[in-house]
Image (cartoon, helix red, strand yellow):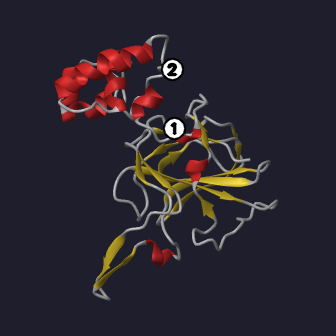
Amino acid sequence: MIKLQLPLKYIYVTQKFGKDFLVFDKKLGKYNSFYNQFGLKGHNGIDFRTKDGCICYATHGGIITKAVKDTGFGNFIELFNDVEKYKTRYGHLKNFNVKVGDIVKAGDKIAECDNTGKYTTGHHLHFDVRETYENGAIANYNNEFNGAINPSLYFNARYDGKTIVNKDWDKSRCYHRYDRGRPKGGLWIEKYRVVPALTKYLRRLPSNEDINACVYGGWEREVLKNPAMYELYSNLKKDEFKNNKIPYLDN
C-alpha cells in the first residue's frame, strides 16, 4: 500500500495532477495542449511552490535508482520502494544529497529545490508517483500519464512524519505549520470570541487561515488586512518570525 509523507515543509500547490493548459503553436497558428507534445493527457504529477535551496525530503523509504541531470526535467531523483512496488520522482532540483544505490528513510533530506530544466517557469518541485512490477518496470504505462497516478490520494503524513488525515494534506499552510492540535477550549475561543471579532474588523467572514493566524499563531488582527504580510502569517507563528525565520528557507 502506498503511504507518502509530504516532500516539503511548506505546502503550496501550483499545479495539480491531471491539469492541462494551452500554449500557442506558432507553426500552426493556434493554441494546443501543452502536454499533448509529450503524449500525456495532462500533468502527470503535482507541482509544489518552492524557493531556491529549500529542502526536499524523501516521501517514503527505499533505494535511489536515479539521480541525474535531464534536459527537460532538470536535476531529478527517482526513489524506488521495492517492497510495496512503487516509484516516486522529484524534479527541477538544485543538487543531490544522495546517489544511486543509497538507501533512504521517509523524511530524509535527499536534495535542495531549484528551477533546473527546460520545462519550468519558476522555482518549484515536480513530484510524481508510479506503481511498478516486481522488476521495477512501470505498471500501466499506457494510462495517458506514462504510468503516473494521482499522488494526492496517498499523503498521510507531513515531511517530519507527523500523521495527517489524507483529505487535509493540501490545507492551508497554517494547518501544517502551527502544530496547534486545538487545545482544550480552543474551539470555543474560535467560534465565540475570534470569529465575531474578526468578522466585525475585517467586514467579512474570516477564513480558517485568518483564525489560525490569530488564535494559534499569535498574530494581531491588523496583520490580516495587510496582503504583504500573508506570506509570513500563513507560514510562521509570530514568535518564529521574531526569531528571524524565513518561509521556505529556514528548513
* 93 relative to 149 in the view: left or right: left
| Name of the residue lying farthest toward the bottom | 28
Relative vertical location of residue 175 with respect to residue 217 in this rendering, above or below: below
Relative vertical location of residue 127 with respect to residue 207 in this rendering, above or below: below
State the residue at coordinates (40%, 36%): 172
User: Which SS class for mark 1?
Assistant: helix
- Give the quarter of the image for residue 221: top left
Residue 120: x and y, percent? Answer: 39, 60
Callout 1 amino acid: Asp
User: Which residue in the structure is indicated by mark 1?
Assistant: 168
- Give the quarter of the image for residue 220: top left
Mark 1 crowdedness (10 Å alpha carbons): few <14, some 14-19, many ≥20: few
User: Which residue in the structure is indicated by mark 2?
Assistant: 181
**Disc assigned to residue 199:** none
State the residue at coordinates (61%, 62%): 148
**Lower position in the chain sequence, tag 1 or tag 2:** 1
| Name of the residue lying farthest toward the top | 184
Mark 2 crowdedness (10 Å alpha carbons): few <14, some 14-19, many ≥20: few
User: Which SS class for mark 2?
Assistant: loop
